[in-house]
Image (spheres, rainbow, N blue to C red):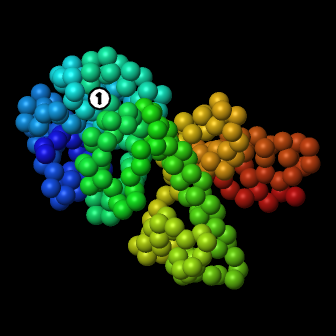
Amino acid sequence: MKIGIVGLGRMGSGMAKRLRAGGVEVVGYTRDPSKTEVPTLEALLECIDIPRVVITMLPAGEVTGSTIERLSELMDSGDYIVDGGNSYFGDSIERAKRLEQKGIRFVDAGISGGIWGAELGYCIMVGGDPKDVSSLEPVLRILATEGGFAHVGPHGAGHFVKMVHNGVEYAMIEAYAEGYELLTASPLRPDPKTVFQLWMNGSVIRSWLLELAVRALEESHDLADVRGWVEDSGEGRWTVETAVRLGVPAPSISEALYRRFVSRQEDSPAMRLAAALRKQFGGHAIKPAAPGGSSQADNAS
């Protein structure tokens, strides 16, 4: 079997490697001429088996949308498009409807596993028509770790489940981060790496994320070379927005998202006002901004 992958970044290239190791021939296309294996999408489609299967591993939004649209112009009825990126589930539902009008089969696959997936296997959450998913299952199971494949519902369900997955991931990372800060602040001075390693054995909070935290602390014991700036993906925001729309309380996920926003503020305008208000009503000391935007201690009583 010979299939195509569009997008050869960290995930896409790792998936191509795992598929090849599992006996599937893969042709990869990316817009970077130094990394692509074929020059165009047309060339990609010309050299893969019919019915053609193309997996897209691209950033969510316009890039994925325009690529799938272009593929739909080039592909024939009965061909398959698998969107393995982190697309918004509502977009996936609409894409499936448009592609169905052309007879092109569409499957949305939420894929987790990061850079380790090529070696350890991925967790693959698939949405789509049961017949289409069944046809693609042999390929997707090569990508998946043992027990890491499931058809979770109709079109859009794969990306919806991946969205919720990422929201939970936000909350877990935030909880481990808060635990780390408590450990480092304590005068008892427990070593966080030793504690995290201990928790990996028999503790109810052991996880792969905790294992990665140990790895990070082995590489940089006090994380002095890491800036506390944390980016957020679209999926974290979509999870919170969806929770609001459905009336589902999700305080931990929401707070974890907001904490990422806080991480990017050098000097919070909200906290400046809070400090000013405390001075106004209670005469509390403030720390005025020093030249250049930093703060210095105010010794006034």
Label 1 crowd (10 A; few <14 / some 14-19 / many >=20) = many
Q: Kindly identify the residue that appears in the image at 72 percent across and 45 percent down.
A: 271
Position of residue 299 relative to residue 243, above or below, is below
Front residue of 211/193: it is 211
Residue 213 is situated, as x and y percent measured from the top left of the image, at 49, 68
Q: Kindly identify the residue that appears in the image at 59 percent across and 64 percent down.
A: 176
Is residue 32 shown to the viewer in this render? no
Residue type pointed to by label 1: Arg
Number of dots carrying numbers: 1
* Side of 110 where 70 appears, left or right: left
Position of residue 93 relative to residue 194, above or below, is above
Residue 45 is situated, as x and y percent measured from the top left of the image, at 13, 31
Residue 267 is situated, as x and y percent measured from the top left of the image, at 63, 46
Q: In what quadrant of the picture does the N terminus appear?
A: top left
* Side of 111 where 42 appears, left or right: left
Q: Kindly identify the residue that appears in the image at 76 percent across and 40 percent down.
A: 273
Name the residue that disc number 1 marks. 105
